Image: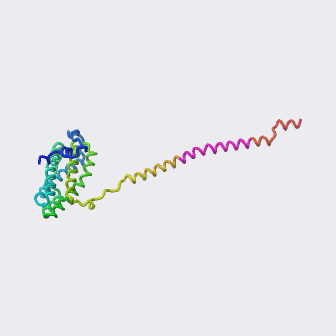
Amino acid sequence: MALLLLPPRAAQAAEDPGVPVPPNQLITDTGEGEVSAADRDFANKVRLAGLWEMPAGQMAQEKSDDPRIKSIGKEIAAQHTVLDQMVRTAAKKLDLDLPDKPNADQQGWLGEMRAAEGKEFDQIFVDRLRAAHGKIFPAIATIRASTRNDTIRKLAQRTNQFVATHLTLLESSTLVDFDELPTAPPPAAATASAKDTTAVLSANQTATGQQSSQVTTPVVAIVVVAAFGVAFLVTRKMWPSNSRRRRRYY
């Protein structure tokens, strides 16, 4: 139990010494910075996660016949105890109100688990927790990258480490059907790249047209001037000057 209560940083460093772990101690935790509606919603979600995943983990220890599921349930419940304390401490510092019971969906999932036994329980336990962690995972990244409040920023970074750990634990059960997971939306980069390419081509075409216009206009002007000059010279040669005409009459 003492090992389970260690921060994920210490546990991961022991297993993967070459993999960097976010240095949480470098993030300030003074409560400074504006707390947005998204920040409050995030704190609520972290609290709600603990309110149903702790009892779910306890049920896994009592109802499952699989030692691996029992172990996963035990670890997730213990780690959520730590995370729950973190979010309540952050909420107290920021004067945030947190929920005190699971929401309707979460209560429904717990009801499913209570009604199941053996392998059916194992599958429901893994399916529900894996789906929930998969949904909150990208939300954590959004808050971590965008929040203006340093306490929420640190909570998001820590929560990210817990959720990544829980995803890995649940997947180690071999019960996750990855083909049934929601698919990621197609990357927007491809569309943006095509638009950028079109814009560049249009710009090049415009620039080429301008260059052509800039080159053609002076050339035409020179040709016109030259033509007038030639015509003038020819005309002068064809018509005798007045002085010549006067000499003939003298």
Residue range highlighted in magenta: 208-232
Q: Is residue 235 magenta?
A: no
Query: Would you say residue 226 sits in the magenta stretch?
Result: yes
Left or right: where does residue 68 sit relative to residue 221? Answer: left
Q: Which residue: 35% across, 56% down?
A: 186
Query: 74 or 152, which lies in front?
Result: 74
What count of labels does the image hold?
0
Question: What predominant SS class does the magenta segment belong to?
Answer: helix
* Furthest residue toward right: 250
Task: Give whichever of 9, 194 is nearer the camera.
Answer: 9
Q: Nearer the viewer, residue 102 or 27?
A: 27
In the picture as drawn, the residue positioned furthest to the left comes out as 62
- Say whether residue 244 is left or right of residue 26: right
**Whole-percent x and y of residue 29?**
20, 40
Quadrant of the frame with the C terminus: top right
Q: Nearer the viewer, residue 173 or 23?
A: 173
Q: Where is residue 121 drawn, in percent x and y? A: 15, 62
Q: Residue at x 17, y 57 (%)?
A: 103
Q: Position of residue 89 (x, y in %)?
A: 15, 44
The image's colouring method is rainbow
In the image, residue 85 lies at what x, y percent?
Answer: 14, 47
Residue at 24% across, 52% down: 137
Location of residue 244 (image quadrant)? top right
